[in-house]
C-alpha cells in the first residue's frame, strides 16, 4: 500500500503548512488491512488516534514510469479506505511508519468500482462520520495531485503491480486538528463514505 500525505488543499490549510511541490509518499503493510465491519483495534501503546477518509486507487496492471497521460490505463478502479493514524507516535517519531502501521489500521471497502465508471475520480464527495457526527466533508476536487499524477509519480519509484493500492490522502476535519481534539475511543463507530464508491463502516475496540 502506497500512501500520500498532505494531498488535500483544505487539509494543508487547517495545519497551516505549505502545499508540497511533489507527492509525499509513505507506506503501510498488509497487516494493517481489514474489511468493512471489522473492528479497528486501538493498541495499548497509543494515545490520540484519528480516522482518515481516503479514496484508494486499485492498480490493475504492471506499470513502471507511466506517463501522466497514460496513467489511468494502469488503474482497475477505486475503493474507500481509512488511514488510521496514532498521532502521538507520528509526532514523536517524526515519520509515519509506526503510527500508521498497526494491525487493523487500514480498513478497506470490498467492492472495486471500475475506473471506466469514475474516470480520474474528480469531483467526488468524501465524508467521515464518527458516531453519526460528520468530521470530514470535502471533495476530491481538493486534491493537490490527482489520480493520474499520483500513479505516474509512484511508478517512477516503485514498479506498480496488479492489486497494489494507492491511498490518495485525506481532507480537512481530522480529529487532532479540531478544537477540542476528537480521538477514536473504544465503542466508537467510524464511517467513510465516498460518492459513487461506497460506504465503509468499522467499530472501534480497545486491545485486550
Image: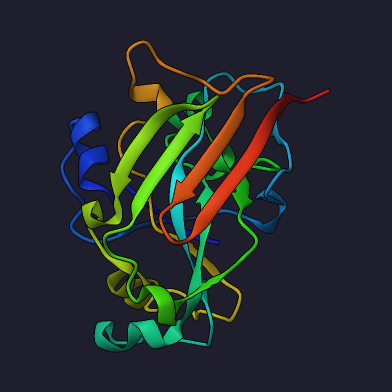
Above or below, comparing residue 149 to residue 123 in the picture = below
Q: Is residue 78 left or right of residue 14?
A: right
In the orientation shown, which residue stands out farthest toward the right?
A: 208
Q: Is residue 182 left or right of residue 109?
A: left
Q: How many marks?
A: 0
Residue depicted at 39% across the width and 71% down the height? 154
Residue 107 image position (x, y, % from top left): 62, 48
Residue depicted at 55% across the width and 24% down the height? 131
The quadrant in which residue 15 appears is top left
Viewer can see residue 54: yes
Residue 30 image position (x, y, % from top left): 68, 58
Choose between 1 and 128: the one closer to the eye: 128
Residue 159 image position (x, y, % from top left): 50, 81
Above or below, comparing residue 202 to residue 130 in the picture = below
Q: Is residue 22 left or right of residue 27?
A: left
Q: Quadrant of the N terminus?
A: bottom right
Viewer can see residue 42: no
Residue depicted at 57% across the width and 69% down the height? 112
Residue 132 image position (x, y, % from top left): 51, 27
Residue depicted at 61% across the width and 56% down the height? 109
Choose between 73 and 128: the one closer to the eye: 128
The quadrant in which residue 150 appears is bottom left
Amino acid at each position: 500500500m502506497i500512501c500520500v500525505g498532505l494531498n488535500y488543499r483544505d487539509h494543508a490549510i487547517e495545519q497551516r503548512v505549505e502545499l508540497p511541490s511533489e507527492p509525499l509518499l509513505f507506506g503501510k503493510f498488509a497487516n494493517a488491512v481489514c474489511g468493512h465491519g471489522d473492528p479497528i483495534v486501538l493498541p495499548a501503546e497509543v494515545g490520540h488516534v484519528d480516522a482518515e477518509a481516503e479514496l484508494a486507487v486499485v492498480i490493475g496492471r504492471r506499470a513502471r514510469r507511466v506517463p501522466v497521460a497514460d496513467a489511468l490505463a494502469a488503474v482497475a478502479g477505486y475503493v474507500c479506505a481509512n488511514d488510521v493514524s496514532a498521532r502521538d507516535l507520528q509526532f514523536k517519531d517524526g515519520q509515519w511508519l509506526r503510527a500508521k502501521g498497526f494491525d487493523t489500521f487500514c480498513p478497506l471497502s470490498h467492492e472495486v468500482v471500475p475506473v471506466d465508471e469514475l474516470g480520474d475520480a474528480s469531483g467526488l464527495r468524501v465524508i467521515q462520520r464518527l458516531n453519526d457526527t460528520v468530521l470530514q466533508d470535502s471533495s476530491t476536487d481538493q486534491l493537490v495531485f490527482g489520480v493520474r499524477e499520483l500513479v505516474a509519480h509512484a511508478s517512477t519509484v516503485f514498479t506498480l503491480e496488479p492489486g497494489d493500492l494507492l491511498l490518495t490522502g485525506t481532507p480537512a476535519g481530522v480529529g487532532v486538528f479540531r478544537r477540542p481534539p476528537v480521538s477514536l475511543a473504544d465503542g466508537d463507530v467510524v464511517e467513510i463514505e465516498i460518492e459513487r464508491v461506497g460506504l465503509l463502516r468499522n467499530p472501534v475496540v480497545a486491545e485486550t
